Image: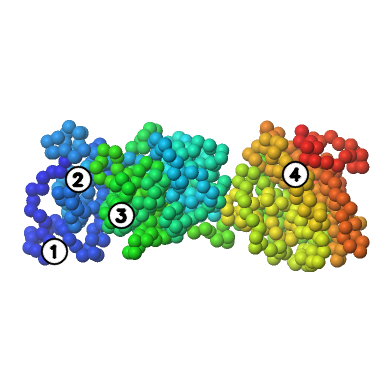
Amino acid sequence: MAVKKRTSARPATAGSAGAAGSARSAGSTRSANGQDKLITSLKQFIRTRGSSYLSDPNVSSIGIGYKEKNGKRSKELALQFTVDKKVRPEGVRDVGSVEIPAVIDIGGGVEVPTDVVQRSYKPHFLVVPEAQTPERQKRVDPVRPGVSVGNVKVSAGTLGCIVFDKNDGSTCVLSNWHVLNGRKGVPGDEVVQPGTADDSRIALNRLGTLKRSHLGQVGDCAVAGITERDFDTAILDLDVTPTQLGEPQIDDKVVKSGRTTGVTHGVVTRPFAKVSINYGAPVGVREIECFEIGPDPGHPADGDEISLPGDSGSAWLFKARTGRPTDVLAGLHFGGESDADPEDRALACFPHAVFEELKITLQPPARGSLEAVTGYDPGFLTVPIATPQLGAAVKADAVQLSGTEVIPYTHFSLALNGKRRFAFWVAWNIDGGAIKKIDRSGIEFKKDPRLPADLQVGNEIYKGNRLDRGHIARRADLIWGPMPEADRANTDSFFYTNITPQMDDFNQSAKAGIWGELENALYEEIEVEGLKVSVFGGPVFQDDDRVFRGVQLPREFWKVLVYSEKGTLKAKAFLLTQNLVLAEILELDEFRVFQIKLGEIQKRTGLKFPATLLQADTLVVPEALEDRTPLEGLADIDWG
């Protein structure tokens, strides 16, 4: 495109004489309020009419900017067009283009001058890996904004900021579509940190999986969950955590921290633009609403480049008058000028639009705002597995909550024996591919406030003796999934309803012995489908259990591991005999672990397991327990 020579005189300014009904000028100096209204009108014009101009093969963008005269920026607002090649009017047809009018009526009789600048754009993803590996391109834990990241099918880009899923509260990384998704990507793809261009060890560098993405008018954006690392929300070398979303205005000063160029400073040159970018086959050309950033003369970048390939996904932050970065997110960097362009420019998506599209927030959702606790999931495995049913002899002893004996917690459920004040059974799910490492510091054992306190055994039995509080559902088994969910499961595991008394010698040795390692041994020995396991466990209540401080202490415990291997459902049952001796003091005789049939657990507990589960137990053992040999080590377990 070329500029069509203006034939009319400069439009009259406010207060000057002019013909009645003549068009009003919008390009000359105006009041702040008037300029805001003009910018609003220009945005609407670009949104509604911009695509018609972008259909011209020589036009790369249309936006709002100050008109440039003799290479210098004036104070006159204009509709600014960028073209791949600027030519004289007589050469327009040679590039398959048409002339751009000197002024354009944007509606309501308001004419705005145009400006044409030679400039084109391209996505800033990394094409060729660099020879050296700076710190930003190495694996980091905790992961933080400003470092290398990418889909396993993409080279590398930048982790923009840490965000949270509005639906489930999960922690995510925010970057670009062409960084976390790419032309060959699909939801669920593995995302690695650093990107594959920086380190090809995918198994070691796995960060999480792609959750959602968008490429279109709203922006070039995507989020991936964090399941394999801890995280730090502060942006690298800026040491600021974004907590607010902003909207850019012309001349705003901004700063970013990117994988390739590090920390660079810029100035908003066009607060609104619609650009046309070719993302290559099969995606093709996409139009994106964005704003443009130029270099900050007061803080020149190394090599005079505010962004380079690999910086895509960086977060631009507004700067305060002091020059320091604020916690207000200005935009999500997604592209820059092409190699042939002489001027350094960057493009960024509008944060409000991106966050709304991806359903994310900068603030971790409060626990109450997440979905209600659903407890043990019967559909967790490929074959549905229901919870055990209580026999008629004990069903009347079950504590009810909201009309049911099944009491839900995060990742586990249980049925509570109100007479014995311990759980009949606990059922829990383990997602081995999403386990988190969370400590237990600051978490107190407590009674469940939803249930009558006198139907739960609390700290009164554990004071001043050798009894330990032993988890039925292991804490380590429960802390998986999105971080807020894992935190909640960590806390829920300390309800006394999930605890039974165990001798300290037994509890401590069991953690390092067979009983405490059954789940770990399963993962080590068997190729578990989806790394998913469902577990049932609990005490065996016997009439002759010894009484201590008014409480009968169980001396036997059972556990059932359920999983799929090569499409076949399998169930493995175990019994632990603690053999407590209660005289003047508590002593531990010995404890032994047996692998048994699931049917034997039914006989000992009065519980009824689903027929599907009974069929999945193929163990062959002697009929009488006294005829069997206890497990001496994990190698004795029959996983066949």
- Disc 1 target residue: 14
Q: Nearer the viewer, mark 1 or mark 4?
A: 4
Inter-mark Cα distance, 1 to 3: 38 Å
Cα–Cα span, label 2 and label 1: 26 Å
Q: Give percent across and percent down for residue 311.
A: 39, 45
Q: Are marks 1 and 3 in contact (CB under 8 Å)?
A: no
**Of discs 2 and 4, which sits in the foreground?**
4
Residue situated in front as seen by the camera: 143 or 34: 143
- Three-letter amino acid code at disc 3? His
Residue nearer the viewer, 260 or 542:
260
Q: Tag 4's secondary structure?
A: helix
Find numbered disc 2 in the image and state the secondary structure of the residue it sits on. Answer: strand
Q: Is residue 625 visible?
A: yes
Residue 181 in sight from this viewpoint: no
> Which quadrant does the N terminus fall into?
top left
User: How many numbered marks have been drawn onto this rendered protein structure?
Assistant: 4
- For the C terminus, give its image quadrant: top right
Question: How many other residues sit within 10 Å of disc 2, few (<14), some (14-19) or many (≥20)?
Answer: many
Q: CA distance from mark 2 to mark 4?
A: 71 Å
Q: Amino acid at mark 1?
A: Ala
Question: Which label is found at residue 565?
Answer: none
Residue sitting at x 80%, y 44%: 574
Badge 1 local density, few (<14 within 10 Å), some, or many (20+)?
few
- Secondary element under disc 3, as helix, strand or loop, is loop
- Vertical position of residue 335 compared to residue 583: above or below: above
Q: Residue 518 got which mark?
A: 4
Q: Is residue 618 left or right of residue 488?
A: right
